[in-house]
Amino acid sequence: NSSSSEKLTMHSFLEVLTVSKLSDLFPIVETALNFFIFIPCSNASGERSFSVLKIVKNYQRTQLFNKNISSSALMSIGNIVLESIDWNDIIKEFASQKAKK
């Protein structure tokens, strides 16, 4: 339906393949397009992780040992997971373990 002067992106090609029900005829093409579209996203998150690590190391280099820097970097990278943790429960459990000693 599109003119020959229009360029078809990978995402729109995958959409055409899915909408026209051609993905059943070409399952390998659909899989390859999915990999092609989503692999750059995973690469970008890896680069973002290294960027965060560089920022954390520069900020805390003189204050912490390498083990603590790595832990801080992992916490910064995995911020989404950390936001879902109920820290009050962890603090109470830690306090009760210290009180038992």
Image (cartoon, rainbow, N blue to C red):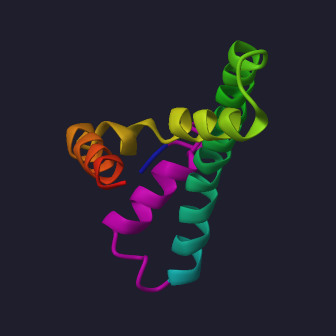
Residue beneath the point at 77% across and 19% down: 61
Is 21 in front, or is 27? Answer: 27
Q: Is residue 11 depicted above or below 3 in this figure?
A: below
Residue beneath the point at 52% across and 72% down: 30
- Number of numbered markers: 0
Query: Residue 42: image x %, image y %?
Result: 61, 50
Residue beneath the point at 34% across and 75% down: 21
Side (left or right) of 50 relative to 81: right
Does the image show residue 5? no
Residue beneath the point at 25% across and 50% down: 96
Query: Residue 29: image x %, image y %?
Result: 58, 74
Is 69 in front, or is 15? Answer: 69
Q: Quadrant of the C terminus?
A: bottom left
Side (left or right) of 99 relative to 33: left
* Residue stretch in magenta: 3-25
Side (left or right) of 31 relative to 85: right
Is 92 in front, or is 80? Answer: 92
Residue sitting at the far front: 101
Query: Residue 31: image x %, image y %?
Result: 55, 73
Residue 6: quadrant of the picture: top right
Does the image show residue 69? yes
Residue 44: quadrant of the picture: top right
Q: Is residue 89 depicted above or below 54 in this figure?
A: below
Query: Residue 87: image x %, image y %?
Result: 27, 39
Does 60 lie within the magenta span?
Answer: no
Does 15 lie within the magenta span?
Answer: yes
Side (left or right) of 88 relative to 20: left
Residue sitting at the far bottom: 25
Q: Is residue 54 depicted above or below 9 in this figure?
A: above
